[in-house]
Amino acid sequence: MNELAETRTFASIIINFELSSASYIEHQLSTLASGNSPATRWTKRLTILSLEPVDFGYGMLSLYRALPGQEEAKMIMLGCRDKYLLPAIQVLRNVEVASFLVQMGPGAKVLQALAELPKLQDLSLTLGGSFRGGTMPLETFSNVRVLRLGSLPIFAPTLQLIGRMVARCPALEEMTLENNIDEPDSTNLDTIFNASMHSPSFVPSLTKLRVIRNMFTLSATSAPYLRSLLHLDLQMHAGKIEASFWQALAKNGVQIRYFAVYPLDIAAVRYLTSYEGLTELHILGHRGVKARDYPDEVFTPR
């Protein structure tokens, strides 16, 4: 295979312990782990899905009741995973973008291996409802520029751990916090930013923030971390955006170019009218009874 073909073929790798791959995954992983695969030179994007052998052809049934012949295949794949997965990740020294469906058990070691990749800049983690953060080495990541955290559980230890991770990434430019799990309590977003803001060398670098379906409270205390913000996407269906948040953004001279916020209230509108330069405005989620709080000022010429 010539160099041009290799760069395209091995640009991206997906590791997924699906039972349908039982016949070849050991050969592929062992070759990768040996360092003799072209992927060690060309792979820029790594995706890691299930670490537990399942047969998606039968849904999740095979997690609980093995079909004929599956149990032996599962044991072989688990042995392959334990022997080759971490070395296979460690040799991918040119990976810049990684995504991982975080799972308990081997998930901590996988996170550690990903954190040691020297060129990693773009990281997506789906944490899941069982994630509590205490044993997961998120704080070992550094120099990440783009961070996406999905299925984010709102527990204080988890958020403090993410805060330590963010503090070790002083050049962080984009952050997405997304949740599809019902949470009973609201937590101030500054829990994630505190460690960074208290550092004497802190310089705000975040230009893009997305908070989707999270039980966060946004207040003035988060504003110092957001002084470089240009892109703001807040879909706070259950959380709370305090008026002090918008007032602090205005006071700090934050001039957002892309603005997509729900719920939109008069404090947000006053912030938008406090500066010039907005280039993209999205009106989200105001339908039916929720429209009663929709401020007329949005459509009033300045």
Image (spheres, grey):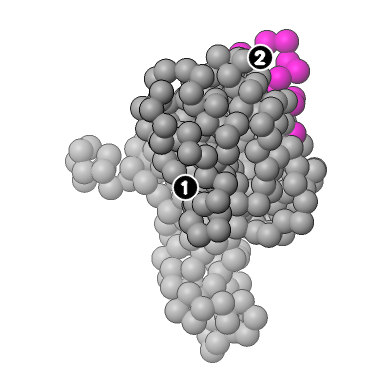
> Which image quadrant: the C terminus?
top left
Mark 2 or mark 1, whichever is nearer to me: 1
Taking the image as shown, residue 71 lies to the left or right of residue 108, namely left
Mark 2 Cα-neighbour bin, 10 Å: few <14, some 14–19, many ≥20: some
Q: Position of residue 92 (x, y in %)?
A: 46, 39
Q: Residue at x 50, y 59 (%)?
A: 288
* Secondary structure under the numbered disc 1 in the rendered image: loop
Furthest-top residue in this view: 200
Residue under label 1, please give it.
Answer: 284
Residue under label 2, please give it.
Answer: 202
The answer to which of 51 and 3 lies nearer the viewer is 51
The magenta stretch is: 191-203
Quadrant of the image occupied by residue 45 = top left
Q: Residue at x 51, y 19 (%)?
A: 274
Q: Position of residue 58 (x, y in %)?
A: 49, 82
Label 1 is placed on what type of residue?
Answer: Leu
Q: Position of residue 44 (x, y in %)?
A: 39, 38
Q: Is residue 193 located in the magenta-colored stretch of the structure?
A: yes
Q: Residue at x 26, y 43 (%)?
A: 8
Q: Is residue 1 above or below residue 76?
A: above
Mark 1 Cα-neighbour bin, 10 Å: few <14, some 14–19, many ≥20: some
Q: Is residue 171 above or below residue 154?
A: above
Could you give the CA–CA distance between mark 2 and mark 1, rounded to whole angstroms?
A: 33 Å
